[in-house]
Amino acid sequence: MAESTAGSGADEDGLTPVKIGGTDPGDGAPIGGVQVPGGISIFNVQSIIEAPRKRSFFHNGVFTTLKQVVDFYNKRDLGGFASPEVAANVDKGNMGDLKLTDQEVDDLISFMNTLSDGYVAGP
């Protein structure tokens, strides 16, 4: 498993992942002093458009390749991954033990690698 890049500086979107008290508050962080009930560690997820050009994945940058991301969703519930920050937010019905074959994993990654328009911003 890749080492987390959380707190190591800005990611490709110019945002800096932040952890507070060991748990990333996500969209559930208090806004204007108001805490959203049950909202801790709920995040807006990144788009897979331009995924081939991203340097980190997930809200805390814990994965650095599409292979690591697909392996996580394919095998998370089989063990070998760190415990979630907030277990109640883990989707156990749709992901975590997808039973994808190696070929299916490779095919999915190949597809995601096509999701780029090739645009590179100039200086």
Image (cartoon, grey):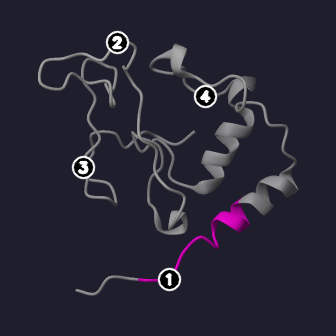
Query: Where's residue 6, x and y in %?
Result: 34, 39
Task: Give the label, 1 or 4, closer to the camera.
Answer: 1
Q: Residues within 10 Å of mark 4 (few under 14, many from 20)?
A: few
Q: Distance between the residues labelled 2 and 3?
A: 29 Å
Residue at numbered disc 3:
9
Q: Distance between the residues labelled 3 and 4?
A: 23 Å
Question: Which residue type does callout 4 highlight?
Answer: Phe
At 53% from the left and 15% from the top, the residue drawn is 87
| Residue carrying label 1 | 118
| Earlier-in-chain disc, 2 versus 4 | 2
In-image side of 102 versus 13 (left or right): right
Tell me if 103 is positioned left or right of 118 in this view: right
* Callout count: 4
Q: What residue type is labelled 1?
A: Gly
What residue sits right under mark 2 in the picture? 37
N-term mark: 3 or 1: 3
Q: What element carries label 4?
A: loop
* Mark toward the start of the polypeptide (1 vs 4): 4
Q: Which amino acid does label 2 sit on?
A: Pro
**Image quarter hosting the C terminus:** bottom left
Residue 104 location, x and y as percent?
84, 54
Badge 3 amino acid: Gly
Between the residue at mark 1 and the residue at mark 2, the CA separation in whole angstroms equals 41 Å
Of 65 and 119, which appears nearest the observer?
A: 119
User: Does dot 1 land on a helix, a strand or a loop?
Assistant: loop
94 inside magenta stretch: no
Question: How far apart are labels 2 and 4 at the CA level?
Answer: 27 Å
Which residue is more in the foreground, 98 or 93? 93
As measured in the structure, the alpha-carbon distance from the residue carrying label 3 to the one carrying label 1 is: 26 Å
